[in-house]
Image (cartoon, coloured by chain):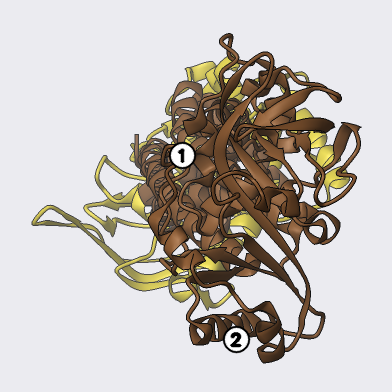
Chain colours: A brown, B yellow
Amino acid sequence: MRDLVRLAWRNIKSRRARSWMTVIGVLIGVTAITALISLGTGVERSVLRQFETIGYDVVILMPGASRGLEGGPAAGFPAAPPGIPGGEEDAAAGKALDVSALRRAVPGIGEAGLIANRIVPVSAAAASGSLRVAAPSPEILSGFAGLLGGFALEEGSGFSSTLASEAVVGARSAVRLGVAVGSTVEIAGEPFAVVGILSPTATGAASPDGTNPSPSGRVGAGRLAGGAAGGQGMGAFRAVAATDDALFIPYDRAQSLAGQGLGAPTVALRIGKGYAVSEAAASIRAEVARQGVSITAVSTEEIAKTIQGALGTIEGVLASIAAISLLVGAVGMMNTMYTAVLERRREIGILKAIGATDRQVLTLFLIDSGLMGLAGGVLGLVLGAAVSSVGSAALGRALGALSFRPVFSAGLILGVLGLSFILGALAGAWPAWNAARLEPVEALSAD
Amino acid sequence: MLAVKDVRKTYHIGKAEVQALRGVSLAIPSRAFVVITGPSGSGKSTLLHLLGCLDRPTSGEVLLDERNLATLSSEERARVRGKRFGFVFQKFNLVPNLSAGENVDLPMALQHVPRAERRERVARALERVGLAERADHRPSELSGGEQQRVAIARALITDPDVLFADEPTGNLDTKTGRQIIDLLRGLNAQGKTVVVVTHNPEIAARAELLVHLRDGEVVRPGESEREEGEGK
């Protein structure tokens, strides 16, 4: 076997230019597949990581009638101008959810937290604009901090009481508003003392915008509200998770804000151990419908699954396109191997004359093409890694808050290498089989 | 003992049918120096190919120790070629990408002979043909005579019973050709059966058994003394 590999290697080297072109054909396909899959996996992991910090045992009840998980406008779409409340939301607010009835109807509901949020006018000494202001209840901060990206304080402290006129400011908002602990901000026209500044979240810190506040100091409401738009599914989820661009005030204090406070709250419920989250979510939906409240209930599990499904589909389509280029590379290799077999008929004859079996000749050519496939695989993997590293930086910038790193799993690496070797060998299989079947004298008579 | 019984070989070239051998029967005694001769197109190379298991007859038997080689599987025929036969060709037929030593080594590599043993045998075989110093040279770096000697070393490396040579001096000058003939004769003296196809009267003159073919048939097999001068 070692001798066959050596002979195959010599043969590859002897037709250097053609071998390289063949390898490049495979390389392109492998590069595309590696880059797309590692990027896709990276995006998926980074999204799912956010869910993991919250936990998959959480059901979120959002104000507004069910429009399905993907009902909200796409991320990045400008939200309705501040001050103009969404129609459905307010109509629904007419009737509040009876949480104790819900607890009675659905077994397994553990702790519950409330958080209201809305984009309202905010002004500070350095800048003013419309910002998302969120009002979490103490239970949210103690039990569902993951919903707020951890809610870790960089400096200062948390709220002293649920009615205090105190604000905790997200990292990016603090930079843009030019506030520090001890400053005063005006939220919807009322003064609040800044008691704490949040640490930048992992996703926010990696975003290039975070370190480069806009010169005007004004915060674009559209961008801030981007992920938050719609109030449903992933949109709502990102709204509460995007803490860097928000301000926080105590839940009870928010109720007395001018106008209608911050509107109807989103309710987060944790389902106790031993209860199936999907069943609990279904029971909650049934109870919500029975109460006739306009509320959408989704579990983090469902949101994660939907996102995973959507990402999987995109990834699948992209990988299929990349696979086509790999296939083209394989056809190129088949051409090379076919020509090589024609050119080397005489050598095949020699090998057979000195005792090589059909199988040994077949193996020799399979190793030959397999090695070229493997070379394309290795080089493609390296190039693909480079492309996806550059690509993830560019894509992270394009996606704004969502930053991620490409993921090169062992499965991807071994899969790509195995696939390129097998594809190479398969491309060589037909010409090699033709070569192996020749009677020695037929092969020897070739010139 | 090697023999053919009423072998026929028909080639199809386009729609035309060419009968290369029309019923040849022949016995080749062990340790004999056999020369097959005849004009171009008489079927002498075809006969050598059938004897050497390089091709299958259209009909008839090729017998090696009473076993019909013609009906063996491709795998078994490869084994017979590798272990019992050695080949020397007019065009040397060395693998161009391998050095002289590696070419000589190849038959043993195909038979999975242990590496250490192979190295020693390659060195000995190259020494036997006077090319010990040329082991690392590629065929393109060797003269015709040297290449043919490498080919002979390769043919002998598996210690075959029968050595087939198809026009071994055809591409060599007279002096080098004579060296090759001496080499083949010496091998025969050491107990190898040697079957040579040639136009070279010098080789024919030294045959123990001279087979003359014409139009795919044996003209008159006989002793070398009586055939002398006729073989061309």
Hey, which quadrant is residue B67 in on the image? bottom right
Q: Is residue A404 above or below residue B214?
A: above
CA distance separating discs 1 and 2: 48 Å
Q: Secondary structure at mark 1?
A: helix
Closer to the observer: label 1 or label 2?
Answer: 2
Q: Is residue A31 above or below residue A272?
A: above
Q: Is residue B34 visible?
A: no
Sequence-wise, the earlier of marks 1 and 2 is 1
Q: Please, which chain is the residue tagged with disc 2 on?
A: A
Q: Position of residue A311 (x, y in %)?
A: 51, 53
* Residue under the image location 51 percent in, 23 percent down: A16
Hey, which quadrant is residue B179 in on the image? top right
Q: Position of residue B31 (x, y in %)?
A: 64, 56
Relative to the observer, which residue lies in front, B109 or A99?
A99
Disc number placed over residue A29 in the picture, else none: 1
Residue wearing tag 2? A283
Count numbered badges in the picture. 2
Q: Please, which chain is the residue tagged with disc 1 on?
A: A
Disc number placed over residue B153 in the picture, else none: none
Q: Is residue A346 above or below residue A298?
A: above
Q: Position of residue A364 (x, y in %)?
A: 57, 48
**Which image quarter holds the C terminus of chain B?**
top left
* Residue under the image location 47 percent in, 43 percent down: A75
* Residue under the image location 33 percent in, 57 percent down: B220
* Residue under the image location 67 percent in, 50 percent down: A256
Relative to the observer, which residue lies in front, A337 or A435?
A337
Q: Is residue A410 left or right of residue A181?
A: left
Disc 1 marks a residue whose amino acid type is Gly
Q: Position of residue A77 (x, y in %)?
A: 42, 39
Q: Residue furthest left?
A: B15
Disc 2 marks a residue whose amino acid type is Ser
